[in-house]
């Protein structure tokens, strides 16, 4: 059970870790000071939650493992984040649409994780759900402004939605090990809010005058450790310090 | 003056020492007044266990606070272990009324209510008072401010920008 639980914690935490890393890339590069601060603040919240998750995972694993070994010393196929969060910051519209597609999922996920029979996970969720509510408000607001904005912002937001929508279904994939934790009352049964998720994002896209793509085929792989070509570049940068100076501490 | 909340459990011998440790981001408030210190007890003679809770999961001030608490107690000859607890989650309700007043005097508008926050952030209501001139003719510039716990506002009367402490419940 402990091994399965550690694996589950990684699938949950890695989404935050990789998205946080993507947002961190924007530090000093946001389109203006307010959005720059907002995106890096969101990244900071995500990292804060990641630290709690990995501290717990390290405690379960014991030995020499620590939050840092989980964050920095795994191999690419050991990261279990969904493909959505590793997609690049192509432009501001991509950054916002990617964030929105994740935030709406994340808020429902955290609402449900609060009810987990695992006390630590429930506590992390109870803390984090309040933070995620702010993230969702920010990204939904910007989806509307970009979609229903100028001709150019609409075009870019639509392009981002067309390209990123294909990654949404993977958010709801659960393997057997995860489903056994669902049955044990520990993991979140994501199927129960899937239709609500799509209703919510479709409603916001309608307000934003954006057209939801007619998608029949969805891309997946990240949750199994099969990542896109972007992942290696992310890890190279993220792991640089620990790989170059093993066991270094700030 | 020592201010303590009802839901904090702090040994009276440790309270004045902890109340002298200030939040590094908001130096007018102590870690006790912020509601960050949840409990403090002696586990042996000259050995204490202090439990703190983060305001935000990613609050970078937490590590500094833990070190500051250890140092303050060490100066009083007490060896302290600081433990981070997540549950129950910190809420802006835990900021004492006196502390709210100090926040305002320092130039940070204190948190309102969660419902008010939503109205304010959506631009539906003008209810956040400028800490400088007290005018409510203010507007949100950014939902995210200089630290995780604050949003950035501007007063349209005195034209000064100011921080608003976001409501967290």
Image (cartoon, rainbow, N blue to C red):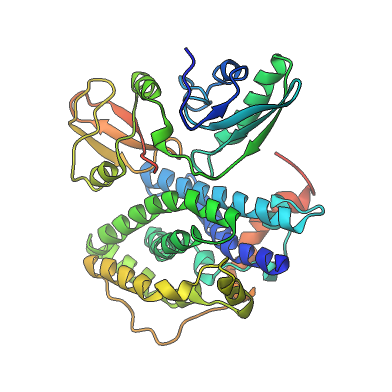
Name the one closer to the observer, A199 or A153.
A199
Answer with the quarter of the image where residue B43 lies.
top right
Instruction: Name the residue: 52% across, 32% down.
Output: B36
Residue furthest top in the image: B1
Residue furthest bottom in the image: A216
Answer with the quarter of the image where residue A235 lies.
bottom right
Residue furthest right in the image: A63
Rendered location of residue A69, percent (x, y): 73, 54
Using the image, determine if residue A63 lies above or below residue B106.
Answer: below
Instruction: Answer left or right for B105 relative to B94.
Output: left
Answer with the quarter of the image where residue A186 lies.
bottom right
Name the one closer to the observer, B132 or B109.
B109
Name the one closer to the observer, A95 or A104.
A104
Instruction: Answer left or right for A101 relative to A208.
Output: right
Q: Is residue A141 visible?
A: yes
Q: Is residue A227 visible?
A: no
Where, quadrant-wise, is the C terminus of chain A in this rendering?
top right
Rendered location of residue A3, percent (x, y): 72, 67
Count up the numbered dots.
0
Instruction: Name the residue: 65% across, 27% down.
Output: B41
Rendered location of residue B59, percent (x, y): 53, 39
Using the image, determine if residue B162 lies above or below residue A52.
Answer: above
Using the image, determine if residue A97 lies above or below residue B105.
Answer: below
Using the image, determine if residue A199 lies above or below residue A236.
Answer: below
Rendered location of residue A169, percent (x, y): 46, 77
Instruction: Answer left or right for A45 relative to A238.
Output: left
Where, quadrant-wise, is the N terminus of chain A in this rendering?
bottom right
């Amino acid at each position: 059970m402990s091994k399965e639980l550690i694996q589950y914690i990684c699938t949950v935490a890695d989404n935050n870790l990789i998205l946080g890393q993507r947002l961190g890339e924007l530090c000093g590069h946001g389109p203006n000071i307010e959005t720059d601060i907002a995106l890096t603040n969101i990244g900071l919240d995500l990292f804060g939650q990641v630290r709690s998750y990995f501290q717990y995972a390290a405690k379960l694993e014991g030995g020499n493992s620590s939050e840092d070994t989980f964050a920095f010393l795994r191999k690419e196929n050991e990261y279990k984040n969904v493909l959505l969060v590793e997609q690049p910051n192509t432009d501001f519209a991509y950054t916002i649409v990617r964030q929105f597609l994740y935030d709406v999922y994340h808020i429902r996920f955290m609402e449900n994780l609060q009810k987990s029979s695992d006390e630590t996970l429930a506590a992390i969720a109870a803390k984090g759900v309040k933070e995620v509510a702010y993230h969702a408000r920010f990204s939904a607001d910007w989806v509307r402004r970009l979609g229903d904005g100028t001709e150019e912002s609409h075009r870019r937001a639509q392009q981002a939605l067309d390209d990123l929508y294909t990654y949404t279904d993977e958010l709801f994939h659960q393997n057997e090990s995860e489903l056994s934790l669902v049955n044990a009352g520990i993991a979140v049964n994501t199927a129960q809010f899937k239709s609500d998720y799509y209703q919510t994002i479709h409603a916001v896209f309608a307000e934003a005058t954006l057209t939801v793509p007619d998608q029949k085929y969805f891309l997946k792989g990240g949750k199994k450790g099969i990542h896109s070509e972007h992942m290696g570049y992310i890890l190279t940068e993220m792991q640089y310090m620990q790989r170059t100076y093993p066991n270094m501490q700030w | 003056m020592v201010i303590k909340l009802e839901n904090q459990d702090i040994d009276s011998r440790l309270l004045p020492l902890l109340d002298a440790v200030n939040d590094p981001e908001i130096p007018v408030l102590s870690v006790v007044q912020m509601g960050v210190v949840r409990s403090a007890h002696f586990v042996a003679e000259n050995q204490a266990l202090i439990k703190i809770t983060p305001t935000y999961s990613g609050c970078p001030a937490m590590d500094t606070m833990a070190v500051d608490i250890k140092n303050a107690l060490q100066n009083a000859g007490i060896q302290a272990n600081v433990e981070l607890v997540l549950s129950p989650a910190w809420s802006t309700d835990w900021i004492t009324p006196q502390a709210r007043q100090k926040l305002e005097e320092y130039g940070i508008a204190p948190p309102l209510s969660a419902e008010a926050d939503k109205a304010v952030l959506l631009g539906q209501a003008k209810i956040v008072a400028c800490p400088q001139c007290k005018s409510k003719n203010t507007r949100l510039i950014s939902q995210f401010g200089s630290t995780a716990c604050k949003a950035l506002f501007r007063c349209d009367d005195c034209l000064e920008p100011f921080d608003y402490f976001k409501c967290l419940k």
